[in-house]
Amino acid sequence: MTGESRSPGRLIVDRETKPYMPPYLKLRHDAGRGRWVLLAPERILTPDQTAVAVLQLCDGTRTVEEIAAKLAEEYSAPADVITADVLDLLQGLADKGYIKG
Amino acid sequence: MTEELRTDEHFRSVTVDDEPTAGVVGGEDDAAELCARAPVGLLAELTHRCPLQCPYCSNPVELEGVKNELSTEEWCSVMRQAGEMGILQVHLSGGEPTARKDLEDIVKAASEAGLYSNLITAAVTLKRDRLETLQKLGLDHVQISFQDVDPEGAEKIGAYPGATQKKLEVARWVTEMGLPLTINAPIHRHNIHNVPRYIDMSVELGAQRLEIAHAQYYGWAFLNRAALIPTYEETLASIDCVEAARERLKGVLTIDMVVPDYYAKRPKPCMGGWGKGFMNITPAGKVLPCHAAESIPELAFDNVRDRKLLDIWMNSDAFNAFRGTDWMKEPCRSCAFKDIDYGGCRCQAMAMTGDPRNTDPACALSPYHNEMVKLAKDEAAKPATEFVYRNPRNAAAALKPKEEPLVPAE
């Protein structure tokens, strides 16, 4: 997950990245359906609770490492394992254009 | 938590596309879950007025006149009702939606109703200050159609001089203002060779998203099929090109593709299922399950002027006509795919076989399938016919067949 860029402009998420959602993405709680939805141009993503927890911490000031540390504390899980998983999750979102850094 | 994270299933996504026939596309479970309670997408055709005359327009051939259009307050009420009933995204489309002087009011109402708003525009008459106002009022996303990447080709198709330069200018404003941009590329035999250049242009403009939208042969496009349909080989090459670009441009450009189904073996799950996740409102307020539903003569459509949107969704005859699978005949009724493709498209079954309950002839199991493929291949092999441009005069002529000759672009 380090260094290689398969396409110009592709964000490679690492521990120092400060991820944020671009302003046109809207994370909303859909009361009628009782779930969170992430609204994007002509797309609706249905994040699960874990993803929502990560996204709510992506404010452009926290690094991935800080986000992972916070989640590790909250879920009593090993920080390095959580960090690797958060990196995976955010890279997947970045590859869809839904996370900037 | 860790095991959960590894599954990479945290962001299942459903496309809510304005393209004819696309509707709601996603993993079956995802779309079904979202749509179980209410539709997720609304296409609001604010007007049929348009400065362009594209021969594949998804509007019905019988265009609605300005005097029948819903009022500002009626559209604003539609937006409020849509938000209340659980719709998540609205496509403000047309015709050309910016032809409505009250677009600002409608965008504001959509935003206040919590709807994610997509402006589907040809952009040739859009001014920068108006776009800025729309953004302030809550507009979320702008989609601009490009009839071709070559300006001459684009002018011939849209019959609007100088269109490309104007569209490029507006596209740059959109990205400068920090709004997400989708490039809409309507594909047919005259521009299918330019699919790679559409991809390059989209990256260059900083678009988030590109729709490679092969013409779907309903309404105007059905009239113009022999002028538009590409060959099987060209179609396959365009699909390969898009698939390679998707991999290459991960995280840079999202490419959605609507493919022509005349060459398919399996039918498309049209609109993601009839009355399942998507509704369409005409300029005069008729509520349809899809763009082309008015081509099915047995259906009658309710109007937002007479009934609440939710009531129409739940209880109207038109929405219930082909919901689920009970209406199906063979071979659909006993087919293992009936809950996946819903027998394909009702309007195409109507147009090609005369009965909307028949299997969509795009399906290889339809007795009409071979005939349809042959028709497509024969038309594509011949020189393209002249365009029947989408304008009121040609609409009038087309609706009384053979009585008056069709006219060229005005």
Image (cartoon, coloured by chain):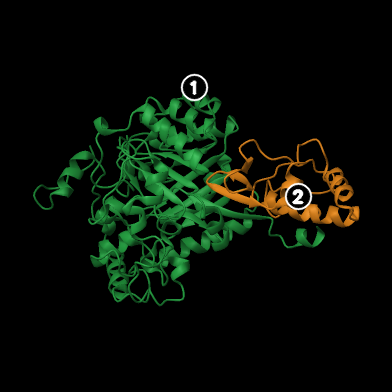
Tint applied to chain B in the drawing: green
- The amino acid sitting under disc 1 is Asp
Check disc 2 and report the residue beneath it: A12
Q: Name the spot of residue B356 as percent of width and height, x first.
A: 29, 63
Q: Residue at x 31, y 53 (%)?
A: B317
Check disc 1 and report the residue beneath it: B129
- The relative height of residue B51 versus residue B149 in the rendered view (above or below) is above
Q: CA distance from mark 1 to mark 2?
A: 36 Å
Q: Name the spot of residue A10 as percent of width and height, x first.
A: 69, 48
Q: Residue at x 85, y 54 (%)?
A: A82
Left or right, A52 with respect to A25, comes to right
Left or right, B177 with respect to B62, comes to right
Query: Is residue B31 at all visible to an observer of this figure?
Result: yes
- The amino acid sitting under disc 2 is Ile
Camera-side residue: A59 or B167? A59
- The relative height of residue B134 versus residue B387 in the rendered view (above or below) is above
